[in-house]
Amino acid sequence: MKRKPLARALCTVMAISVLFTACSTGGTTSSGAASGAASQAAAGGGKKYAIIVKNTGNPYNEKEAQGFQDAVKALGSEAIVKAPDQPTAEAQIAMVEELIAQKVDGIAIAGNDVDALQPVLTKAMGKGIHVISLDSSVNKDSRETHVNQADPIAIGKTLVEAAFDMMGGSGEFAILSATSQAANQNAWIAQMQTTLKDSKYKDMKLVKVAYGDDLRDKSTTETEGLIKSYPNLKCIVSPTTVGIAAASKVIVDKNLTDKIKITGLGLPSEMADYIDKGVCPYMYLWNPIYVGSLGAYTLDSIVNGKITGKEGDTFKAGDLGEKKVTKAGDGGTEVLLGEPFKFDKANIGEWKSVY
Amino acid sequence: METRKIEGTKTFNARSFFFQWEWLLIALFIIINIFNSGISPYYLQLDTFTDAPMSFLDKAFMVMPMAFVLLLGEIDISVGSTVALSSVLMAISYNAGLPMSLAIVLCLLVGTACGLINGLLLAKFKELPSMIVTLATMTIYRGIALIILKDQASGGFPKWFNFLGWGYVGPIPLMMIMFIIFAVAFGILLHKTSFGRQLYGMGNNLKACQYSGIKTSRNKILVYTMLGLMAGVTAVFLTSRMGSTRPNVASGYELEVIAMAVLGGFSTSGGKGNMVGAIIAAFVIGFLRYGLGLINVSSQVILIVVGLLLIGSVLAANFKPGGKKKSAQKGT
């Protein structure tokens, strides 16, 4: 009969492991909830804001969330950060439901799907929760406004010009994107294709748009596939930080640095080495920390009634200065962070430790 | 007249009755609810018990027939892909002009067909393990869905379709009501019909059943077809919840459904399990996930906790007093 105590012991281990999780995480978050509730009465501050990023394991998303958290704390409110382990809409739907149950005041979401989140976000707005999207938009009926890092037209033009320059004006190139439903990447790719119609770029041929899903392993295999299928490939443009880093590594590992160049949107901390090696002569981005904090300030302004998210509203976004709500390409409104910023050999040393 | 004790029947023994796996699951469910309300002030509100299930109810439709499959000692890992394919075909047929109600019927038919194919393949090629066959159909069905929609989304359904996944009948979500109806139906099928008893028999001793004249091939095909049909049902509700669909939905659903069934007491080697257990297990996992999400535990930690729960439950089930011996008599 030595099996009975074993069964009891296993059940106890199970219960303890669940309780252990609660203690290690619930300890910090529940004290946060208590102090948040206590300061509810404070006007302006004392609100609860949540950010849902696209997925975990992505330094860009982490910096965005960090910027959001720091700005929310500076505003005297409580920040909740949620990230699904897979970049799917289903996971984000469940997270929005959990936030609705926690009665948060505002949600900022980087959508994994433009349309699939509409039912759940409409439900949240119906319950008095203010919803904005940031980074990757959701459709205009699912949000009050969108926080966009930079004008998609500018991003599209800049990336095409960069590829043109790196390819010597002609040749085949490919795009390595994130997930196929990501609104931000799709908007930039659409602008790139519009830019390509200009006669200046007539000798450039876009052979394929591959989807790496913002997952390192898939981005790597997609890059290897591109190299194999298109032997005359001269350039890969990757408008996602995971893609550009994965593609650069493949090029370096296969010793193709002289043949294929990489550009796109990359994090300086991840790409510093590749810029120095010349695989990526230059690339663009903006500060994801600022995207997060602009999201926080926008959400706070809406929740406190300073703006409603309609075109023409202006508000102060902390250190980022005065911001204005403008018309967005999808029929809704958006707030722009600024222009894309160029990183090359000259300045990468300075920026790689910042983000 | 002498009375005679019939061999093999169990007399009511209070301790073994309450030590049944299902009672332990109910106890676990209660513990989790106490635990959840302790860690979050938002847990104990009326909405919780109607909203929390929404995150797992769509998969839960597949738990019952998956339990049947496990009972046979088989497995089916293609259900996630079946959901995706049914959903995609429903969406594109609606957008091609088919009336919505017919598109829903098409979704159910596609799911049933996918299940039927699995069943026919396994009945025809008896030497092939179900893991391999359903692994193949998993990739084939998902592949067809990807060929059809590539990387696009398809949606734009009529307003009433939204009601299926989000609507309430009084205080109770429509999905919950449908789930209860199906759960009761499958429960009766398993425990009160001869078909159900045949499944238990097949799981315990397939050869004996074949020699006893039980139509084992027909039963196997029926079970897989039922699972396919319920995958179609899941597809309808999932698509309604999301308002649109794409080829990579429902990925990983098969493993979650199997986890719920295994936690419910259905062994992967077949022959034992109780429908009530599977249903309670679905709620246990679902509410645990919801409660942890409510205090914003990171998704990776939730994965670890659910994994530990599963391992713990499987070990505990196999180490119960006289566990292996009882499996022949279990399954009342």
Image (cartoon, rainbow, N blue to C red):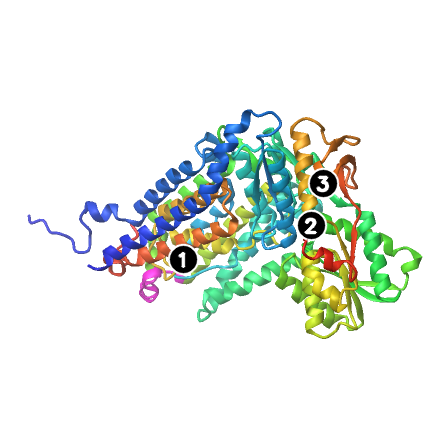
Which contiguous range is marked in magenta?
Answer: B202-216
Looking at numbered disc 3 in the image, what kind of residue is underneath it? Val
- Residue drawn at x 59%, y 62% as measured from the top left: B140
Q: In which quadrant will I find the N terminus of chain A?
A: bottom left
Q: Is residue A349 left or right of residue B313?
A: right
Q: Is residue B39 left or right of residue A243?
A: left
Chain letter for the residue marked with disc 2 in the picture: A
Q: Main secondary structure of the magenta part?
A: helix
> Of residues A15 and B328, which is closer to you in this image?
A15
Q: Which mark is residue A182?
A: 2
Q: Is residue B98 visible?
A: no
Chain letter for the residue marked with disc 3 in the picture: A
- Percent position (x, y) of residue B82? 56, 55
Label 3: state its secondary structure: strand
Q: Which mark is residue A147?
A: 3
Between label 1 and label 2, give the one nearer the viewer.
2
Q: Are marks 3 and 1 on the same chain?
A: no
Chain letter for the residue marked with disc 1 in the picture: B
Q: Residue pushed farthest front? A: A350
- Percent position (x, y) of residue B61? 48, 46
- Residue drawn at x 77%, y 61% as measured from the top left: A263
Q: Is residue A304 visible?
A: yes
Mark 2 neighbour class, 10 Å CA radius: few under 14, some 14 to 19, many 20 or more: many
Label 1: state its secondary structure: helix
* Mark 1–mark 2 distance (CA, rounded to whole Å): 38 Å
> Of residues A54 and A332, which is closer to you in this image?
A54
- Residue drawn at x 24%, y 60% as measured from the top left: B325
* Mark 3–mark 1 distance (CA, rounded to whole Å): 48 Å
Q: Which residue is mark 1?
A: B70
Label 2: state its secondary structure: loop
